[in-house]
Structures are given as structure tokens and as C-alpha cells.
Amino acid sequence: MRGKIRLLIPLGLIAALSLVGYSTASGNKSTAKDTLVYGASADPALLDPSLVSDGESLRVTDQIFNSLVGFKLGGTQVVPELATSWSSSKNLLAWTFKLRRGVKFSDGTPFNAAAVCANYTRWFNFPAPLQSDALSYYWQTVFGGFAKPAPGGLGPDKSLYRGCKTHGQYSVSILLTRASSSFLAAIGLPNFGIASPTALKKYQADAGSVDATGVFHPTGTFATRNPVGTGPFMLQSWQTGNKLVLVANPNYWGPKPKLKRVIFIPIGDEAARVQALQSGEVQGFDNVGPQDFGTITKSSKFKLFKRPPFSVGYVGINQSIPPMNNLLVRQALAYGLNGAQVAKAFYGGVGTPANQFLPPALFGFAKKGVPTYSYNPAKAQSLLKQAGVSVPLKVDFWYPTAVSRPYMPDPQRNFEAFKASLEKSGFQVVSHSAPWRPDYRAGVQAGKDQLFLFGWIADFGDPADFLNVHFGSKTAQFGFDNPKLFALLQKADAEADAEKRTVLYEQASVEVMKFLPVIPYVWATGAIAFDKNVKGFVPGPIGPVNAPLANLFYTGGT
């Protein structure tokens, strides 16, 4: 259901336009060539990349922070970022990085090996409240345990990370407890952006409380007002629900940004984002809904960039909330969800029905042996009876509001279709919804939701980014403990031989679909729209934008 007309020009957008020369009296719109206004589908959660996992946050933090390595523009190849080169020991347990010289954080303090180790030491030693799946998600899914684990959490014996060692000012080694073929690409994620140790301490990055839904309420200001990195931009101001303004970082070590200012405006309604582009109020926006592809491409004023299908939409299942720990119930869900119909009906012809979690473009995609769960209400009801539960089975099903993602451009519409198919299949669906920021994502990742709509966009081109991240260890989000699957995925990640690694991930793809921690239903193509006068954008398969906004320039509004 679309928003009301009064929502189509948000108050935050009007406020932002006063900064860039928007004129309502004459009906003419103009934007300074050194300023880009970007329509986001939601506010960031926080501006500390180590404590977020959503694209809306990472799109912004990726402009503020750099990681040791990054990815080739438009692709998935690992390339230098803060490190100029790297090498590993023969046993792959020590990775040594040569660092750029003369780099400064935006607060003027020096970047060096000690700063790298300070960040890794911070993440490994996060206090118990920050060890929540809703916060330090990427540390846990890439590295595992913590130095001092929270009650019931994973300790150093379960961690991939062993330590960090400096070799003078411009060389550093990351030490691992086991071999990992995906480690190098994983640390290229914006979540492992290196922050100023001085700023982390000064602005109390780890201070605050975490509420019952997993939302972090910082008492320090690092994650809200003072994020300090080495990236091309730095934060000028952030008014939640209104606008977030980045300005060029005068200390940036790379080519100076062509844009002096980038303004992010949260516009949760898809129709409003399209209208904002058409009227010239924004010059670009991500997560273009498939239903709007035609509107964008038919106009000579705009450009549409489609991403390769490197995302998956799924119905998540929390096995810690009975009876979802019963495989027969999960199988009944799989037969009761008409995923193929949703993929074909609501994705503008660019959604492909998914039969497994990995998209076909990745190695490890299983071409045979995958169980099929075609929509079959009678089969679903039969399985529920075998499971010994009362029919109709009452389930709590959550979906997000005020957001649009490539894997669910219109979450409510997907949810309503799934609810209808489940209620024909022996389920009584109790509907729940919450705003994407901060409640929905935090609740899902903290393990509060029994069934939920969610998805994943590739961070790097490796099956570990999909399978190991989601199913390689015990998490609150899915609430299961499967040592056999964990061991298989760890073995696949440790395997250096490409052919053997592919076979192991194919086995894991099949096992996931037998175990059904989630029910994938669509491989989706995302898209970004820009005003034709925005130049320099290169689309790619990974990340929230896959291009630093420093590469863009704007030749002026019309």
C-alpha cells in the first residue's frame, strides 16, 4: 500500500533543499554542482560501522571510513585501501599488511599500525552489551568469539581472530587461529573500517545501554555525532528523520572528492523517492522498485543502473521459539509459502524464484540434490499433523515498514501474499510490523521474532558471505545449534583448493535446504537511479553502493 500524498515531499527534504539552492517560488529547481542530494530508504542505525549490518548505515559509513583492503570498482576483486600490499604465512595463520604512509584521520591524528591494532583489539574486546547479534553482527559472523564473552556467548576458543602485531609504524600482522579462504575479502567490508583511536576514546564509542530489543542507545557521541575515519567524507550534521550531511574530508589521502557535500534524505516510501527524482529534489536513490524501472528508463533525464542478482530474499525462522525447532513444521512452512508466485508477481520481471540460499552466480551453488518445496497446501497440512501440532498452527510473522530493499521492494505486499498462502496451508498468521530502523532489524537479530521477512545483499563475492555468515555458527537470529553444518562450513572456508572448496559449498547448499533455517524465495536484482547529470558511477554486484561517492560529480541541475 502506497503512502498518502502528503508524504511525497518529506519535511526533511524541504529542509535539505534550502542548503542547495532549491526555489519553490518560481518552480525551478537547481542544485550546486558540488552538492549531491541522495534519497535513502531509511536513516542509518548508527554511524559506527562495527556496530551495524544494514545497507542504509553502511552506505554512509563507507564514505567516512576505509578498511585495510577494498574491492575493485564495479567488481569483487580485492584491492588495496589503507594497506598497499599484503602477504600470508604458508599456513595462512598470519597475514601481514604494509600500510600507506602519511595518512591522517579526519581529526588530524595519524593512521599507523598501532591504530589498526587498536581497532581490532577494540572489536575483540567489545563489552558484553555490544556482543549482541543485533550490533557486532559482522565481527561474530566473520571472526566468532570475544576475548571476554558475555554469558552464553562465544569465547576466544571459538574465535578466528588470535591477535594483532605491529612491525614499526607501517606494517601490521593479523593473526588467526585457523586458515580461512574468505578472510582477506571479509576484512574489506566497510564494517571493518579503521577509526581514529583518539576519537573512539574521546567520544566514548562503547558507552551506552542496549534495550530488550537489541537497540544500542549510546551515551557517547562517536556513533551519532563524531565518527572519525580516513575516508573521503566526514560528518557535518545528522538530524534523524530529516537529513544527514557529509562534507569533503580535507585530510583525505586519496584523490580529492569532486563533491564538497552529500546530503542523505530518508524517504521510506518508494513512490516518494521516484517523485523526488522526477522533480529534481534528489539526484539519486538506491533500491529502485522493479515496478518503477520503466518509469526511470523511459525518461531521458535519468539513468538506471541494475546490479547483477547478488541478493536473496527469505522468510527467516527462529528455531528457539517452538515449534519452529521441529523440522516437520519448517518443512510445512516451506510447502505453505507460495514463494514462486511472489517472486514472479512483485519484482517487475527481474525476480527469480530461489530454490536455495546462494545466488546462481556464486560458486558453491548446487545444481543437483537440492530438496524442492513447491507450493502445496495439502502437503503442508499433512506435515503439520505428522508434527503433532494443533491445526491451524498459530504463528507470529513479522515484516518491516518504512523501508524498501532489492529483495523486498514492498515488504507489506510480500507479507500479505505469504499470509494468504500460509492460511490456506494450515497456519493461523498473527501479523506484526515495526519500522526498519531501529526496531525491526534489531528485533530480528536479537532473536525476538518467530517468523520474519529478511534478505541479504552480497558484501563480497564468496559463498562464505552468504552461508558462513548466516549458518556457520549459533546466532540469536535463527536460534539453532547444528555442529555438523557448522563444521562443514568451517571446512569449506578453510579449504584452499578452489575445486574442493566448490564441492564443499555445494554440499553445504544442499544441507541448508534440508535443515531449513530459512526459506529463500527470490534472487533479486537491485537498481540505482541517478539524474543524467550525475557522472562517474560504476554499478557493481556488492555493497550498499559499491562505489565511493568521491568518484561522482554533478554537472548541474536543470
Image: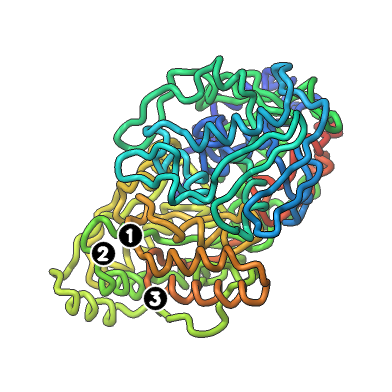
Residue 127 in the image: state x and y as whole percent. 41, 31
Residue 15 in the image: state x and y as whole percent. 60, 20
Q: Quadrant of the C terminus?
A: top right
- Earlier sequence position, callout 1 versus callout 3: 1
Q: Is residue 381 left or right of residue 434?
A: left
- 225 is higher (above) or lower (below) than 505: above
- 296 is higher (above) or lower (below) than 48: below
- Dot 3 alpha-carbon crowd within 10 angstroms: few under 14, some 14 to 19, many 20 or more: some
- Kindly check if marks 2 and 1 are in contact, taking CB atoms under 8 A apart as contact: yes
- Earlier sequence position, callout 2 versus callout 1: 2
Count how many numbered circles sit on residues in the image: 3
In this view, the residue in front, 26 or 311, is 311
Residue that sits furthest to the bottom in the current view: 368
Q: Which quadrant of the view contains residue 61?
A: top right
Give the labeled residue for mark 1.
480
Give the labeled residue for mark 3.
514
Q: Is residue 20 left or right of residue 403?
A: right
Q: Nearer the viewer, mark 1 or mark 3?
A: 1
- Dot 1 alpha-carbon crowd within 10 angstroms: few under 14, some 14 to 19, many 20 or more: some
Q: Is residue 98 left or right of residue 505?
A: right
Residue found 32% across the figure and 62% down from its top: 419
Per the model, the C-alpha gap separating discs 1 and 3 is 14 Å
Residue 375 in the image: state x and y as whole percent. 38, 77
- 330 is higher (above) or lower (below) than 99: below
Give the labeled residue for mark 2.
325
Per the model, the C-alpha gap separating discs 3 and 2 is 14 Å
